[in-house]
Amino acid sequence: MELSFVVTAVRRYWWITLICIVVGTMAGLNLRGEAVEEYSSTSLILVSAPTASAANTFSSGGDRYVQGELSVLQSTSLAESVATDVGQGLTADDVVELVEISQIISTDVINITVTTPDPALAEDIAESYVDEYFDALRAQVNDAQADDIEQLTAQLEGIERDLGAVDDDIQEVFEDVLSSVPTDPNANVFVPDLSQLRPDLETRRVILSAEYERVAIALDQLELDSRLRITSRLVQEASPAVLADTASGAMLPAAGLLAGTMIGVALAVMAAAASRKSVDARQVAEVLDRPIVAELPRARSLRTARRSMIDAVPVNVARAVEELAVLAETHARPGESFSVLVVGAERAAGSTTLAALLAGRYATHGSQTLLVDVDVRDSELTRLFAVGSPGLRGLLALDDEQPTSKRAKRIDPFTSTSIPGLSVVGIGDSTRLGSLRREAPALVEAASRHAHVVVYDGGPLLDAASTVQMAQLVDAVVLAVPMRRIYTKTLRAIGAQLGDRRAQVLPVFVPASRRRATDQGLGDPLVAVDEPQVELVERV
């Protein structure tokens, strides 16, 4: 589907698009008004890969490690732990829906954002996520070193028991020594050292103490290594819950506007495609099997100053008429006069204006031109330029073979104009004309003897059988199609009437006339084919 068709469809059915836009926008505003206020709390964690010396179990690159930790934070198992810790009847699925976990671009920082209608719950979940994550890291490292820690702890306990036994033995030794000391306070008492009393106990105590210190240092080092394995750091604890700037709520009116616009455009296109009336040049060309060859611009002077339209042509209109005149003249037969019939696709289509412009163009370029009014319904050309003229009957009555004395007595059917070389033949008294349909061949032949170029103003093509007959006799047919919706069945009827003459048809877009809006019963131009008025004109 071409863009021009869509644009034209929206222009024609703008009210459908407008209604959809208004409805969509109102729906978006209504949904935003019903949206529940939500609060968000955020925690930040810095994730970095452990060094090989600290934990050789982690050997992947930093970014890969961050992605792995991001997967851990997004896991269902961690969500279950958080749900259990927070309580309040939460499930793992509830936690997953409330939490958004993402990596800040170009950093190793993971953002944990919790959004809920309850600000306290948002803070609790954000804090619990951090606690459960680091607890899981510590548990993972401790599980890897549990055997070593258990063995060292058992050694410390054994050494403590041995030291206790040695201390008991030492205490007994000194109790025996102290029991033999005189009770006289003035007596000099000498208490020997343990090395003098029991050197073996002293030596054993020193050995056990040294062993205890060695094992304790090893256990501390192991615990320190465990802490070094956890390289992630808490950057920000759960922030106080604030009112969330929910993009979804803020964007609801815009989304409604966009959705309404799209639906409105789609409905307008569907209405245009299903309509009985054509919308754009593409549809007109498809029905007529002929492309639009020109487009006549709108000009106010052509509507107001009707009598001067042949010699006071706006520049933009003159360019379009020039192109059309050249295209039409390509159908001329060598060595013979050229005839062109200008008709409208419907009433008030502007055939008179277009015929006058074409005739003026040919005359200004040096051709002896005849502008003939054959519009039996609305002879505007006659009213403008040839009132009182004998018209077509006078043209048919001309006979160059008569003597000069008799020829001078004839009434001249030609009306001069302000353009040299351009004459107008009005329709004359239609009551004396007889059947124009039967006289059409003779009329075309008579007119061709008096001009190089003959331009006929035929009015609506389907309003009279004589106009259809004229279309079969001339060299080219210019079809004025108003730039508005036109019944496709009218275009099909025109194509059927033209038949084999379609190759000589030149469809032209012309500005729509306001006269059509005031005509009575002109909603469908096809109705005019069978109107009694046309039959009376043709058969009088």
Image (cartoon, rainbow, N blue to C red):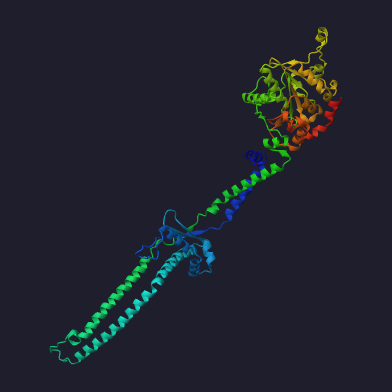
Q: Residue furthest top?
A: 405
Q: Nearer the viewer, residue 491 or 19?
A: 491
Q: Which of 454 and 133 is in front in this view?
A: 454
Q: Which residue lies furthest to the right in this view?
A: 540
Classify residue 103 by image quadrant.
bottom left
Answer whether residue 44 is visible to the viewer in this image. no
Answer whether residue 185 is visible to the viewer in this image. yes
Classify residue 216 by image quadrant.
bottom left
Instruction: Count every numbered label the image shows and give the total.
Output: 0
Instruction: Point out the image quarter for the N terminus.
Output: top right
- Please indicate whether residue 338 sits to the left or right of residue 208 in the image: right
Picture layout, residue 180 above or below residue 204: below
**Percent coordinates x, y for residue 34 in the rendering:** 58, 56
Picture layout, residue 77 above or below residue 40: below
Q: Nearer the viewer, residue 337 or 269?
A: 337
Give the residue drawn at x 22%, y 82%. Answer: 203
Q: Which of 259 and 41 is in front in this view?
A: 259
- Please indicate whether residue 476 sits to the left or right of residue 158 in the image: right
**Percent coordinates x, y for residue 91 in the rendering:** 53, 67
**Percent coordinates x, y for residue 438 in the rendering:** 84, 24
**Percent coordinates x, y for residue 484 in the rendering:** 69, 35
- Please indicate whether residue 265 sits to the left or right of residue 536 in the image: left
Instruction: Point out the image quarter for the C terminus.
Output: top right
Picture layout, residue 83 above or below residue 163: above
